[in-house]
Image (cartoon, coloured by chain):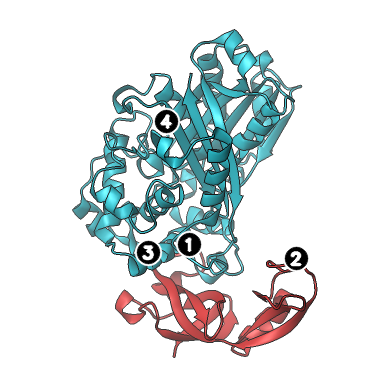
Chain colours: A cyan, B red
Amino acid sequence: MEKVCVLGAGSTKYGKLEDSITDITIQASVGAIESAGIDPKEIQAGYISNVFGVADKQVHLGPVIMSNLGIPEKPSLSIESACGSGSVSFREAFANVAAGFYDAVLVAGTEKVTHTGTEWTTTYFSYCSDFFYEGGAGASFPGLFASMARAYLTEFKATEEDLAAVAVKNHENGLLNPKAHLRKKITIDDVMNSAVVASPLKLYDCCPFSDGASAVILCSEKFAKAHSKNYVNVIGSGRGGSPATLQGRDHMTTIPSTKLAAQAAYKMAGITAKDIDFAEVHDCFTIAEVVDTEDLGFFEKGTGVQAVREGRTARNGDIPVNPSGGLKAKGHPIGATGVGQVVEVFEQLTGKAGERTVKDAKIGLTHNFGATGASCAVHIFQSV
Amino acid sequence: MKQEFIDAVKAGNVLTKKCTKCGHLHLATVYFCQNCGAKGFENQILKGTGTVATYTIITVPPAGFEKYTPYAWVVMKIDGYELRVSGFLGGIGSPAQLPVGAKIKIIGYDDRGILLEKQ
């Protein structure tokens, strides 16, 4: 297996964007190409992740993006795996470079939905669930995670204020990220007093609907060494699945696919959770970050809230989580999110994260899933 | 296969598929045994009564549910089995009305999916 590296990364701002889905994807891709310092013709394939291109009248994005980059003859794959599309796509790119099929590929994720309004997005996002049992019976995505939150609050010593603390922390990090969607300091009271969306989750427990695109150049170690000293090694890659429905799970306070993906990634990297210096995890809702940090092995089950209360996951804590602001504050353009996490890790490990730099970080982890964790990918990165 | 399941729900029941090889029970919509991989099943009808395993009360609904809001979406543990089924439970405005563990039952099926009610 070839060693695989991230050579460059680019991203648009996340938020409400005016440009088309094609334009923002190209902007992020050009950013990644320039960051890598390569000629676009050196790219041998494209992996383009997106969920609701239909909302901006463009699906089958792969060839459109490759054509706009002046490489229409290069093959591409357009990938959808709900909110996990970006990391699932990254994994396929990783596997193909590791297998030696390609020396250098573009991985771009993108989403453009905010112009459709809250009802459209709430409704269409619910199609990412097993619709017969969940979306079709009135379960929105906030509702599904609220059901996990209710189970967690019932089973463990945790309060709604504990969940709110996750939002407060991630907003603090987002303040330092110039590309974040929500750059606003909030308090526990702000979260507790915000409108209920699906009890026990309130508006500030939820990530925003965002537009945005992120891209990276993934390549073999040989290719990386020939082009730059400023690259990052991908040392672990893992995937896992969970029952598509919550009713199909014996426990609703854990996401099985996270555990499976993390175990596989740790095994490939030859490390354990204790070796991770910081992580970008899938905090679509505050409860998700708590569950993620337990399933990834950072904390014992039921103690994730205590870790947040003690500041252990803050940017200056012993295991900083979501220094970018996470989905919660940086934003969640669903097809882009998994790639955006890699952009953050690349910037952190190559000295480009500015004010939000995690001190002395050498090993970073990304964790991204689709729906309530039905599909999941975990990747581990190490600085050179 | 879904229609058979829906017909059972309309009668207040849950249609499950029991693996003829290992006995593992599944909700109707499965084609290979999750436990042993075998393909042979026999129908087993369970009474649609149970308890709230977890739930949420939705106040920002997806399209089509506006006129029912607020309502609860509930995961119900089926009495006597380690099996759960989820559905719509109307007329619920506050968490105090629907604690985890409360007794509920299936009462039918319509455009809101599987309909549940407090016992």
Residue A212's disc number: none
Left or right: residue A64 compared with residue A133: right
**Residue topped by disc 1:** A140
Between disc 1 and disc 2, the foreground one is: 2
Label 4 lies in what chain?
A
Left or right: residue B28 compared with residue A144: right
Dot 3 alpha-carbon crowd within 10 angstroms: few under 14, some 14 to 19, many 20 or more: many
Label 2 lies in what chain?
B
- Residue A33 visible from this viewpoint: yes
Label 3 lies in what chain?
A
Element at label 2 = loop
**Residue topped by disc 3:** A152
Dot 1 alpha-carbon crowd within 10 angstroms: few under 14, some 14 to 19, many 20 or more: many
Looking at the image, residue A369 lies above or below residue B12: above
Mark 1 to mark 2 CA distance (whole Å): 32 Å
Element at label 1 = loop
- Do the residues at discs 1 and 2 belong to one chain? no
Residue A13's disc number: 4
- Do the residues at discs 2 and 3 belong to one chain? no
Q: Label 2 near label 1: C-beta < 8 Å?
A: no
Mark 4 to mark 3 CA distance (whole Å): 33 Å
- Do the residues at discs 3 and 1 belong to one chain? yes
Element at label 3 = helix
Element at label 4 = loop
**Residue topped by disc 2:** B37
Which residue is depicted at the point 42% across and 35% down? A275
Mark 2 to mark 4 CA distance (whole Å): 47 Å
Q: Label 3 near label 4: C-beta < 8 Å?
A: no
| Amino acid on which disc 3 is placed | Tyr
On the rendered image, what quadrant is the N terminus of chain A found in?
A: top right
- Give the mark nearer the N terminus: 3 vs 1: 1
Residue positioned most to the right:
B40
